[in-house]
Amino acid sequence: MIELDRIEDTANLLEVRDLSRFYTMGEVTVSALKNISFDIKQSEQAEFVAVMGKSGSGKSTLLHLLGLLDSPTSGQINSKGVNLLDLSESQKARFRLERFGYVFQEYALLPELTALENVYLPAMALGKKKEEYIKAAKEVLEQVGLGKRLYHRPREMSGGEQQRVAIARALINKPNILFADEPTANLDSTSSKQILELFQRLNREIGLTILMVTHEPDDKKYVSRVIWLKDGELAEQGM
Amino acid sequence: MFNNLKLSLFLAYKSITKGNKGTLFLTIFILSLIFINLVFIGSIFLGLTETINNQVINTLYGNVVIEPKKDEKYISDVSSIKQKIRNIPGVTGISAQYIIGAAFSYKDKSGAWSVRSINPDDEITVTTTHNFMIEGEYLSNLDTDEIIIGKEIAGGYGGDMEHLSLGGLKTGETIDVLFNNGVKRSYRVKGIFDVKFIQSNLNAFISQQEMESVIGMENSASQILIKTEDRGNEEKYIKQFLDIGIKEKINPWPVYSGIVKNIISSFDMIAMLISGIGLFVASVTIFIVVYMNTISKRRQIGILRAVGIEESVIINSYILQALFIVICGTGIGLLILLTVIKPFFVANPIEFPVGFVSLMILPEKVSINIISLLAVALMAGFIPSWMAVRETIIEAIWGD
């Protein structure tokens, strides 16, 4: 469906060029993001990038654009040589399913499904065999420390556990990048620490690239790079 | 394709089995009531039509009517015709009648009605009037000075044409009858009948023997009524009658339904209108249920789309849910109709002015209702879910 064969191993995982997003509200045009450019490299040591900035600085908008949940007003997003903004809506959906993982602030689990079902849903959508996706879902739930909570529904789990289910769901299809939008905002400090340590472990042990929006300055200690946004513009990159 | 359908089924199944049971049962219950309403109204109208048709056949004309040849007033050599017809398989009754107009007088009341003559032994093989005597007795072959009359002529029984009746004539009393040929006779009223059909209740009957003395003819008739063992095959019988050499005019009973045919057509139209309204209500109900469902699951729809589930999978899952509700609703509705409502109405038919009416549930009509509801479910499942996936993912997940 997507011509991934032409992807070069050396190409960047994400190349962001002059990305802008304006919102029109009546006769007023509000600029949420202005000319953002940066790369996320594909290297032996995967990156764990934090997008930081004050409230309203455009962090979440940037994450939504990079995760193909929203479309920019102008600019380019390439991934491994593929111009993602040229894809049709259904190609974008397929790309999100195959290549991206998402963790949202509010867990975003389906309440009618058990932890196991929530996790294997994206794998099922990929058309994998039942025994394969159940096995994979159990493994990944084991990996996030929920091996004993497979058949619990979201309402039967704590916030931290629900967020770990969301992480497991994001990992099931072995994504290239995991997008996390303030994943610890609704959690207590213990659960937050567990989630961030889990991210760090996944980044280091399985080489998962993570792009995380956070407003907690302390989170810097877990990541390899910080992209600072101020009033919708790239203010600074580095640690 | 197959995988997408599997995924839609999975989402629909989980939503149905793990979602709000109370809402689900209430929705299915409403759908079953809508289905019962659709079938019930149509079946009552069909039952009404059936009763009217039966009344026309059983109290007025039988299945086939033989009339005099063109330009002739009477059928001649009736006994020979009766003999020929009697041998045809499927013919269960034959009754020859003279019909003549007459003026009736009773005390200070008078009116004009038709008098029919019958051979009671023959007549009871064709019509059922003898079963509906509300006063007195039915005619016998030997009665020459007696008459039986319908309640609309007698009056006093709350008929629809009471104002034109003889105003309360009772059994045993005498009335004067002036036939159109000028012959005047007095008859003792032997019985009064009410077959629950106004056209039949406007008749009076005397014996064949008496009529022949009034008109001075023998072995003739104004019409010969023929009852067959089955309905709907009248044309087949008519062909057989023609084949055995009957030269008279032969017509099936619907030719005589006249105004009744118009009434039945009107009932059919009303039934169609009510069914249309019922289907509209059904579609609005299903639409609202699915719409509320999609609105309450707007965020979930956004999440599903965010993780890469195709829109068609989401839409199909809602269509499947709507189909499930409709299938359960119609299934339960059908069960209630066939095991409770139909047996009840068969045992307790409703008394309408045209007779006792029961439900007539025709499989083909029920099938049309089921197919229509399924089509409605497809649309009512599709439109709200399609509207829901038209939103941007951001609006669906984080919108107001």
Image (cartoon, rainbow, N blue to C red):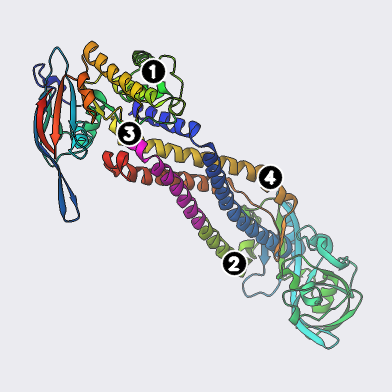
Which stretch did the figure color magenta? B276-305
Quick check: do tags 1 and 4 share a chain? no
**Which quarter of the image is occupied by the N terminus of chain A?**
top left
Which residue is painted at 43% across and 48% down in the image? B287
- The residues bearing labels 1 and 4 have C-alpha atoms spaced at a distance of 44 Å
Residue at 70% over, 62% down: B55
Q: Position of residue B312 (x, y in %)?
A: 32, 36
- Most frequent secondary structure within the magenta stretch: helix
Number of other residues with Cα within 10 Å of mark 2, as a class: few under 14, some 14 to 19, many 20 or more? some
Q: Which residue is the site of mark 4?
A: B340
Q: Quadrant of the C terminus of chain A?
A: top left
Looking at the picture, does residue B113 appear above or below residue A236?
A: below
Residue B263 tag number: 2
From the viewer's perspective, tell me whether residue B307 is left or right of residue B245.
left
Residue A199 position within the rendered picture, expressed as x and y whole percent measured from the top left: 26, 19
Per the model, the C-alpha gap separating discs 4 and 2 is 30 Å
Whether marks 2 and 3 lie on the same chain: yes
Question: Which-is-in-front pick, marks 3 and 4?
Answer: 3
Nearer the observer: mark 4 or 2; the answer is: 4
Answer left or right for A2 relative to B196: left
Label 2, label 3: how far apart the Cα atoms are:
58 Å
Q: Amino acid at mark 2?
A: Ile
Q: Amino acid at mark 4?
A: Val
Q: Position of residue A86 (x, y in %)?
A: 13, 34
Chain of the residue under the numbered disc 4 shown in the image: B
Give the residue type that dot 1 points to. Lys
